[in-house]
Structures are given as structure tokens and as C-alpha cells.
Image (tube, grey):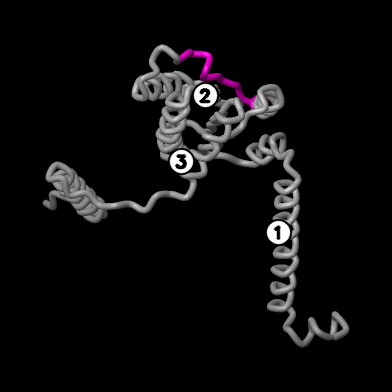
């Protein structure tokens, strides 16, 4: 009798390999042998936004979306790490901070503790207030965030999590800069042109280039 069920041997081998690599990486870390990781471009951008908002005396808003189960789970966990990074840097500068947990209530208490611990790590435990973190329920959260942006006029907004079209709708409220609006318009034009070209290529592949040329009168 085989110890490993049929079809499960590959999964078992993969699991063992992951364990071995994980323990090896932990052993390397204890030996002080770590690897340099190239910084993500978004991190300096977030720090720049936080500094700019502090100089202007405007709040920093962190908006999260996603649930702690299913395919969103990994992005939510990564989002909480980013929330900790942002709130810790905001706390160091004593800037105004608002963090929003949207649609899924189970994320709210975790985000509260995440922000609380970030303020403690920054040495600003007494500055933390629970109303720094807000929860907006489903179906109304888009309008709630848009109203928050209109009311608070933030200097920087960080969107993280499993987002869909609602992030585009919300972000348009804070796009009052003419250059930003023009850039968005140019990107939309590029998308339209790309779709038209793809349709033309698909037609050419379907009916043949010669027939397409005759049809277009070329």
C-alpha cells in the first residue's frame, strides 16, 4: 500500500520543498545573511505624499478594500502591512490621519489594532485615537469616501487592497489638478485607440487582409 495517496505526491513534495526553503531562509536571517530587495517605486511616492500633506497641514487618508477570505485574503494582508507603514510615518510627523475600512466589517478591528501598534512603534501612543479608523458599509462606501475627500481635502490618499471600478470613481473627486485631469483624459484616449486597433486586427485575421483592404476601399 502506498503511503501517499494517488495524485498527492506532487503536493507533498512541493510542501516539503517550501518548508525546507523557509527554514533555510530563517537560518540565513539568524546568521545575519540577508538579501537586498529592490525598493518598490510606490514607497518613495507614499513618503513624498505624506511629507507634502504634512507641510500643507492637510490629512493623509488610507483607504482599504477587500475581505479576509477567498482570493482577496493575500492582498488584504499586504494592505495591512502598508497601512502600518503609512500610519507609522504619519505618526512620526504628527500629521492628521484617517484610515478607512470598507464594506467588510471583519477588517475594521484588525485595522484599528494595526494603526494603534504603528503609532506605538513611532513613539506616539498618546496621539492615537480610535476615530482615526472608520468603517463604511457596503453599497454606501463609495459615496462615503467621496464625501470624506470633499470634506477633509486631504494632501495625500493611499488606496490599497482588492479594488474594482469604485477606486476610479472615488479618486476622481481628488483630481482637481488640470495636469492630472489631462493625463487621465490622454490615458482614456489611448485605451480607445488600442481597442479600435485590436478590433481591426481581429477583423483582418478573420476575413483576411486582402478582403479587409477592399472593404475599406484601400
Q: Which residue is mark 3?
A: 71
Label located before the other in sequence (3 or 1): 3
Residue ID at (43%, 23%):
115
In the rendered view, tell whether residue 197 sits above or below residue 78: below
Provide residue 154's location: percent of width, then percent of height: 63, 29
Q: CA distance from mark 3 to mark 1?
A: 27 Å
Q: Nearer the viewer, mark 3 or mark 1?
A: 1
Q: Nearer the viewer, residue 88 or 185?
A: 88
Residue range highlighted in magenta: 128-141
Quick check: 184 above or below 86? below
Residue 171 shown left or right of residue 8 in the figure: right
> Which residue is outermost to the front?
55
Q: Residue at x 70, y 55 (%)?
A: 187
For marks 3 and 2, the one nearer the N-term is 3
Relative image position of residue 92 (x, y in whole percent): 42, 26
* Secondary element type, mark 1: helix
Label at residue 95: 2
Q: Is residue 24 left or right of residue 123?
A: left
Q: Which mark is residue 191?
A: 1
Amino acid at each position: 500500500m502506498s503511503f501517499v495517496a494517488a495524485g498527492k505526491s506532487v503536493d507533498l513534495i512541493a510542501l516539503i520543498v517550501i518548508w525546507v526553503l523557509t527554514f533555510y531562509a530563517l537560518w540565513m536571517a539568524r546568521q545575519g545573511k540577508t538579501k537586498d530587495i529592490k525598493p518598490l517605486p510606490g514607497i518613495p511616492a507614499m513618503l513624498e505624499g505624506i511629507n507634502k500633506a504634512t507641510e500643507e497641514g492637510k490629512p493623509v487618508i488610507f483607504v482599504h478594500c477587500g475581505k479576509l477570505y477567498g482570493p482577496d485574503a493575500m492582498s488584504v494582508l499586504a494592505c495591512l502591512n502598508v497601512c502600518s507603514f503609512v500610519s507609522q510615518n504619519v505618526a512620526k510627523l504628527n500629521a492628521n490621519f484617517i484610515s478607512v475600512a470598507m464594506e467588510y466589517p471583519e477588517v475594521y478591528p484588525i485595522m484599528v489594532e494595526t494603526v494603534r501598534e504603528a503609532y506605538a512603534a513611532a513613539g506616539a501612543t498618546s496621539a492615537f485615537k480610535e476615530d482615526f479608523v472608520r468603517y463604511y458599509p457596503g453599497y454606501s462606501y463609495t459615496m462615503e469616501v467621496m464625501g470624506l475627500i470633499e470634506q477633509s481635502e486631504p494632501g495625500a490618499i493611499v488606496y490599497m487592497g482588492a479594488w474594482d471600478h469604485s477606486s476610479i470613481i472615488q479618486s476622481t473627486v481628488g483630481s482637481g489638478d488640470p495636469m492630472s485631469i489631462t493625463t487621465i483624459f490622454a490615458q482614456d484616449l489611448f485605451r480607445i485607440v488600442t481597442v479600435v486597433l485590436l478590433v481591426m486586427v481581429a477583423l483582418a485575421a478573420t476575413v483576411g487582409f486582402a478582403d479587409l483592404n477592399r472593404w475599406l476601399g484601400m
